[in-house]
C-alpha cells in the first residue's frame, strides 16, 4: 500500500520526535488539557475499560491516559521507533503491550476482546484502502459492548482546493467511512465532522460499535466547525489548571 509505505518512511526515521508529539497539543495548552477538555468528554462513555487497544500511539501522547483507565492496554503502530519509545516510556506499566504492525493488520489482537479502541491524530493520514483494511478488523475485535473512536480524514468532502498543510488523506470522506462500517456489521454511534485549523470540516471523529450494541442509541451526526475555538478556550481557561497538576507530577 503506497500510503503505508509513505507513513512508514515518514514516521520511522524522518520525523523529528524530540517533542514526543507534545508540539501538536500547543493549540490546547498541552496534551493534559487537550485530553481532559477535548478528548475525554468525547470518550468518557467508554472509560474506564477493561481492555483497550490504541491504534498508532506514536510516542504515547494519549497512552498515559488510556493506561490509567484500563486493566489491559495494547498499542499498535507501524513505526518501530514509536513502539520502542513507548516500551521505554511505559516500562513501569505491566498491563501495557506495544507492537509494530504492517500498517493495516490487527491480527495480534483476539477477536471480540476489546472494550475500547482509540485512535487520535493518526489515521487522518490513512487513505481509504488502509481504513478499508482496519475498519472490519476493528469491528471484529470489539467486545459485545465495545466501542471504537477513530479520528480520520474528511478531505474528499471538505478539502478540495485547500492547501493540505496537515497531510490529510485526500481520498477519504465521512460517508465512505460510514458505508464501510455498515458493510462490515458495525453501527455509527456519533460522527462529528471537525475543522483543523481555519476553514471547513476536513477531519472527522467517528465513534462506532457492533451493529447490535447500544441498541437504545440513535446514531447522531454533528458538524462542528468550532473545534479549533474549543481548543482556544481550553488553552485559555483550562490549561492553567493542568499546569498546576503537572507541577504536582499528576497524570
Ligand atoms: C501524528 S503521529 C500521532 C501519534 C499519536 N496518536 C499522537 O496523537 O501523539 C501519527 C502516528 O501514526 C502512525 N501511523 C500512521 N499510519 C499508520 C498505520 N497505517 N497504521 C499504524 N500506525 C500508523 C505513525 O507511525 C505515527 O506514530
Image (tube, grey):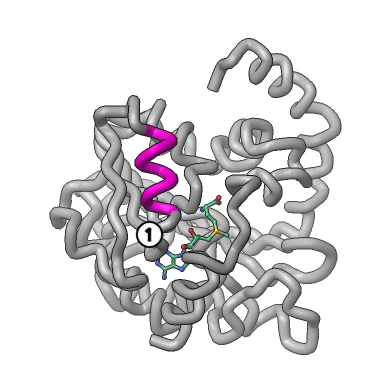
Quarter of the image where one finds residue 237:
top right
Confirm or reject: label 1 Cβ below 8 Å from ligand 1.
no
Q: Is residue 84 magenta?
A: yes
Q: Residue at x 40, y 26 (%)?
A: 68
Q: Is residue 30 magenta?
A: no
Q: Residue at x 51, y 41 (%)?
A: 62
Q: Residue at x 59, y 59 (%)?
A: 192
Name the spot of residue 151 as percent of width and height, x first: 53, 60
Q: Is residue 78 left or right of residue 222?
A: left
Instruction: In the rendered view, tell whether residue 190 sits above or below residue 172.
Output: above
Name the spot of residue 163 as percent of width and height, x first: 79, 80
Q: Which quadrant, please, contains the N terminus?
A: bottom left
Q: Is residue 197 left or right of residue 65?
A: right
Report if residue 230 is visible in the image: no
Instruction: In the rendered view, tell whether residue 101 sits above or below residue 96.
Output: below
Q: Residue at x 40, y 84 (%)?
A: 129
Instruction: In the rendered view, tell whether residue 104 sits above or below residue 84.
Output: below
Name the spot of residue 220 as percent of width and height, x first: 53, 57
Q: Which residue is mark 1?
A: 80
Q: Is residue 61 left or right of residue 82?
A: right
Instruction: In the rendered view, tell whether residue 172 sits above or below residue 115.
Output: below
The span shown in magenta is 82-90
Depth check: give the residue in front, 237 or 80: 80
Name the spot of residue 196 as percent of width and height, x first: 73, 62
Q: Which quadrant, please, contains the C terminus?
A: top right
Q: Is residue 46 left or right of residue 12?
A: left
Return the residue found at the far top.
248
Provide the secondary structure element on which disc 1 rests.
Answer: helix
Which is the main secondary structure of the residues drawn in magenta? helix
Report if residue 223 is visible in the image: yes
Q: Callout 1: 10 Å neighbours few (<14), some, many (20+)?
A: some
Amino acid at each position: 500500500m503506497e500510503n503505508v509505505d509513505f507513513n512508514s518512511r515518514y514516521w520511522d526515521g524522518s520525523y523529528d520526535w524530540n517533542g514526543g508529539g507534545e508540539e501538536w497539543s500547543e493549540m490546547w495548552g498541552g496534551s493534559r488539557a487537550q485530553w481532559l477538555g477535548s478528548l475525554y468528554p468525547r470518550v468518557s462513555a467508554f472509560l474506564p475499560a477493561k481492555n483497550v487497544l490504541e491504534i498508532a500511539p506514536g510516542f504515547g501522547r494519549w497512552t498515559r491516559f488510556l493506561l490509567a483507565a484500563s486493566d489491559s492496554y495494547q498499542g499498535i503502530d507501524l513505526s518501530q521507533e514509536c513502539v520502542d519509545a513507548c516500551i521505554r516510556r511505559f516500562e513501569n506499566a505491566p498491563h501495557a503491550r506495544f507492537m509494530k504492525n504492517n500498517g493495516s493488520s490487527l491480527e495480534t489482537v483476539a477477536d471480540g476482546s476489546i472494550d475500547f479502541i482509540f485512535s487520535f491524530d493518526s489515521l487522518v493520514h490513512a487513505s481509504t484502502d488502509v481504513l478499508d483494511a482496519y475498519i472490519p478488523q476493528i469491528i471484529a475485535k470489539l467486545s459485545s459492548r465495545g466501542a471504537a473512536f477513530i479520528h480520520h480524514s474528511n478531505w474528499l468532502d471538505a478539502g478540495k482546493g485547500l492547501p493540505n498543510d496537515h497531510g490529510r488523506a485526500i481520498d477519504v470522506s465521512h460517508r465512505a467511512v460510514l458505508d464501510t462500517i455498515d458493510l462490515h456489521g458495525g453501527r455509527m454511534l456519533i460522527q462529528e465532522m471537525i475543522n483543523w485549523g481555519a476553514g471547513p470540516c476536513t477531519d472527522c471523529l467517528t465513534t462506532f460499535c457492533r451493529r447490535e450494541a447500544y441498541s437504545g442509541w440513535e446514531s447522531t451526526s454533528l458538524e462542528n466547525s468550532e473545534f479549533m475555538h474549543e481548543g482556544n478556550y481550553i488553552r485559555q481557561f483550562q490549561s492553567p489548571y493542568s499546569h498546576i497538576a503537572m507541577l504536582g507530577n499528576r497524570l
